Image: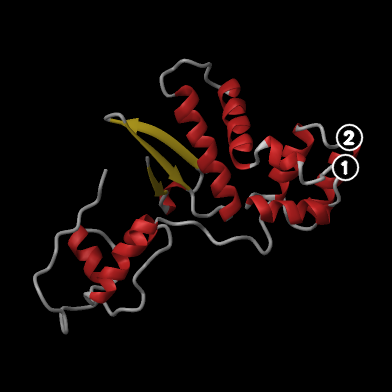
Amino acid sequence: MRIYSLTDDNKDLDAYCLKWHNQPFIFLSQTKSAERSRFNAAHELGHLVLHAEDQAPHGQDAEQEANQFAAAFLMPRAGVLAQGLSNASVTRILVAKKRWNVAAMAMAHRANELGLMTEWAYRSLCVDLSRRGYRRSEPHGIPHESSQLLTKVLQQLRADRRGLATIAEDLGLEVKEVQDYMLGLTPTAVDGGGSAGASGPRGNLRVVT
């Protein structure tokens, strides 16, 4: 499984997935909150698991199945039931969402899906969350997740005094493009404008597609 960020040219997309030469790929928008990105990643994983071989219906049915997969994957039934979310208040939902690192609205929907809330309590909760700004964003949310491998690569590049401009030059890309592909990780601590101070042969970098 390989996960990449979408560039600014794809602002209308939240996420999508595909298989290329039997290798699964997921692409995520970095304009969404980290909580939303986690759900989008789980949603696309659901598509890859459930629908990659065209064994399930497409369209709205497939989207609903992927959403159900993502909710169960990120907020397991047994764990959620143990949280005491019966007709939960906004405060209780916000505590629970931090436990699972999901969006407040997703946490509320999962509690309702599991039969822990009446329809009136669920609607009132959603209205209250929306009023507090949780429908369009995730106040005081978690940071975006990123590749541990990429972090180690960048640490080594910093040690070798190879900055972002040098990486972009090796890849034949603009600096902004490299920043987008790196899911927000960039070797900003090093001046990458030239070879002064660099030692040893330059390595070869390439974009994996």
Give, as a three-letter code, the residue at label 2: Thr
Looking at the rendered image, the quarter that the N terminus falls into is top left
Residue 128: x percent and y percent?
A: 84, 51
Residue 81: x percent and y percent?
A: 76, 39
Q: Name the residue rendered at 61%, 33% in the picture.
A: 67
Horizontal side of 102 relative to 202 (left or right) equals: right
Residue 133 is at least partly visible in this image: yes
Q: Residues within 10 Å of mark 2 (few under 14, many from 20)?
A: few
Question: Residue lying farthest bottom?
Answer: 197
Horizontal side of 79 relative to 32 (left or right) equals: right
* Tag 1 residue: 87
Give, as a three-letter code, the residue at label 1: Asn
Mark 2 or mark 1, which has the lower sequence index? 1
Question: Residue 202, located in which quarter of the rendered image?
Answer: bottom left
Q: Give above or below for 193 relative to 72.
A: below
Looking at the rendered image, the quarter that the C terminus falls into is top left
Q: Secondary structure at mark 1?
A: loop
Q: Name the residue rendered at 25%, 64% in the picture.
A: 168
* Tag 2 residue: 118
Q: Are marks 2 and 1 in contact (CB under 8 Å)?
A: yes
Q: Name the residue rendered at 39%, 32% in the picture.
A: 18
